[in-house]
Structure formats: structure tokens, C-alpha cells
Image: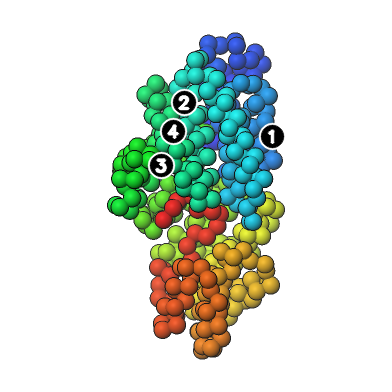
Amino acid sequence: MRKFKRLQMSPYYFLFLILGPLTFNGSLARATIEDEAAQTVDYFYNLEFDAARKAAAQLEIRHPGYPAGAFYTGVSLFQQYLLEYPTQEETLSRFEQAMQRTLTLAKEMEGTDPALSHYYQGAALGFLARAAVARHHYAAAIPKARQGRVHLKKALDLNPNLEDAYMGLGMYDYFSNRMPAAMKPFSYLMVGVWGDRKKGLAYLERTMRQGQAARMEAASILAAIYASQGEQQWDKAQALFAELSAHYPQNPRYRLGWAYVLERQGRWEEALAVLDREGSWLEKLHPLVRPTAEASVHLRAAESLLFLHRYDVAEAELKRLESTPLAPFLADWFKLRRGNWLDAMQRTEEAQTFYDSIKLKKPAALARQFKSHPFPEGPQDVLPNLWPLPVVPE
């Protein structure tokens, strides 16, 4: 896969900024706005929240009536919501307001540029549906998803070269196909698509290669898909996570995903090297994400060390976490690995106490397994991708 590069601006870009959008015909003016919008993407994915929202606000100031600024404000807030612990309803409310503003502006441009109008309506509705799913509000997500897909399809019918729109259609095709068989008729009735795994992946790959602002979102989603339990395409996932981690060093999602993929292949030493748990990269993270990122890194490092039977070093990592306030979704996995270490030290009764205190379904199931088989059996027993909130449902 080719290296990710910053998107290049249109040669008309600087002249456009000086003379304004009315200087050119409508299609060229909008193309240059889209070029400008694409330049803000690196801020979003490197978790530079202030810079991202400032860039989005500048888009709104320079191009009043165009939906890009409102849309990217919403995208930034959605990313923040996925990373926050605990999640903040205020962030979600601001996200929803930005997306509603996007919908209003997009509808108003339907007479002048119907393809982009439908694209922004579809993209905004898609993000609103994803936010509803993240909150387990599935009934609220369904109509948004259905309407969003209709708008994206219309956008591509009007302009097949609108590359970013293929990402949304790809997600609908892929995830509808991955639903359990019993749910597929329901999915078709609600969203209007049976799903096509191959087509969905092809559309996502197309946007990653040829898209503009949606290029990095497509790459992020593909990395998560290839690393998911349903796909397990480790080589593809590793390549994407490694590229994304290099391109966006302040986003711990990619480094943690990369380490997870290596662990699932039993490549424990390589996973530890990627985690770089004493490295300066952790100090550079945004204060919003650093505490949970550090806890996630040390927990996954402790796990790799347990599988390597390096129990002394694993204990040091676990002791470090004992004095750290852990989110519930990390705390139960910590208890599981602490129990594993106690098992290794033949302190069986203490291990049982930890196992019995676990409440979450998957670590509790593994804890019951370890009561009869006290040591982790292999890569299939590693922690799932716990944080940020998953973008790929299993």
C-alpha cells in the first residue's frame, strides 16, 4: 500500500482565497472549497482538537452557506466523544447540533449543486447513525442510516466521481452483509440493502486510494475491519495501523490497534516494541486521551509479558495499574490478567478472588476457563480492542 501523504491543494487554491468563490464557475469554486476542507483532516486524525475546530470554523467564516465547516466541526466532536472517558453528553449534543446545521446548509444548496448536497446530507446522517449505535440506540440509528444511504446513492448517480461518497456506501454494504443471517431480512426492510461484503470492501478501498477528505476515515475503518474477529486479515490490518500510526503519532488508536494485531499473531516481542510503553510518544498525547491511553498500553504490555512468561516484568506493569484509576471496561481485564499472574505464581486462591469479581461478559468467560486451565492458551485469548469506542461492531 502506498504511503499516506498530505492531500495536495488545487493550483487555484490561493487565488481562490483572495478573490472568493464567486470568481469562478460553481463547480470549480466548490472543488477548491473541497480541496481546502481536505487540508483540515490531519488535525482531526492527529487529535489536535483545538486546531481542528479552529480550521472548521474558518471554513464556515470563509464560505458561509457551504456545509463543509459545520460538517467537520461535527466530525471533530464525534471523534472526541469516542475518546472521552467518561463520555460527555455535552460533546454529543454539540456534535448533533453541528450535524443538524450541516443538514440545513446541504439542503439549501440542492438547487445549485445537487450531488454535493446529497453527499453532505448522506454523510451527516451516517455520522448521526454511528453516534446512535455507539450509544446502543439502534431504533434511532435505523432511519438515519436508511436516509443517509439514499442520499449517498443519489450523490453518486449525479456524480460518479464523487469519491468520498463511496466510503458511506461501502460501510452500508459491508456491515449489512456481516449481520447474522436471521437479522438480514430485518436489515433490508430497515436500511434497504442486503449487503455485499466484497463490494463494501472495494468501495472503502476506493475511497482510501482516490478520495479527498474521507480518505483517512476509510483507512481507519478498513484497519478496524481487517483486525476484527470476522475478518482476521492480519497483514492488511497491520500495514494500515502501522501507516496510520506513523502519520498520526498523537492518535493512540492506531498504535494500540497495531499492537493488538501483532498479539493476535503471537508476536509478543514485536507488540511490546510497538507499545513503547516508556517512550516519549505518550507524553505528547492530548490530556483528554493520555490517562486512558497509558492504562491501555500498560495493560496490553502486561498481557504480552504474561504470554512470554516474563512474570517479574509483567508484575511491575500490573502493580503500576493497581494505583491507577481504571475505567470499568479496563478494570475487569486488569483483574483477569492479575489473576493470570497469581496463577503463574501458584497463588490459586488469590487468583480465584480476582476471577470471581469480574462482571463483564468476555473477561468473565475467560476467567471461568482459567479456573480449570490456569494459563492463557494462546493469541485468541488476548484483550479485544477496548478503547476508543469501537468503530466496527462484532
The label number, if any, that marks residue 344 in the structure image? none
Task: Say whether disc 2 or disc 3 marks the residue closer to the N-terminus.
Answer: 2
Q: Are marks 4 and 3 in contact (CB under 8 Å)?
A: no
The label number, if any, that marks residue 147 in the structure image? 4
Q: Taking 322 as reference, is 180 left or right?
A: left
Report the residue at 69% width, 34% height from top: 54
Q: CA distance from mark 2 to mark 3?
A: 17 Å
> Badge 2 local density, few (<14 within 10 Å), some, or many (20+)?
many
Q: Quadrant of residue 12?
A: top right
Mark 3: which amino acid? Met
Mark 2: which amino acid? His
Q: Taking 179 as reference, is 101 left or right?
A: right
Q: Secondary structure at mark 2?
A: helix
Judged by depth in the image, the label closer to the viewer, 2 or 1, is: 2
Residue 23 visible in this rendered orientation of the protein: yes
The label number, if any, that marks residue 171 in the structure image? 3
Question: Label 2, on which residue?
Answer: 118
Tell me the quarter of the image containing the C terminus: bottom left
Q: Are marks 2 and 1 in contact (CB under 8 Å)?
A: no
Q: CA distance from mark 4 to mark 2?
A: 10 Å
Mark 4: which amino acid? Gln
Q: Are marks 2 and 3 in contact (CB under 8 Å)?
A: no
- Find residue 131 and report its horizontal and vertical position in percent: 53, 45
Report the residue at 47% width, 28% height from top: 119
> Badge 3 local density, few (<14 within 10 Å), some, or many (20+)?
many
Task: Say whether disc 4 or disc 3 marks the residue closer to the N-terminus.
Answer: 4
Report the residue at 49% width, 15% height from top: 111
Question: Label 1, on which residue?
Answer: 54
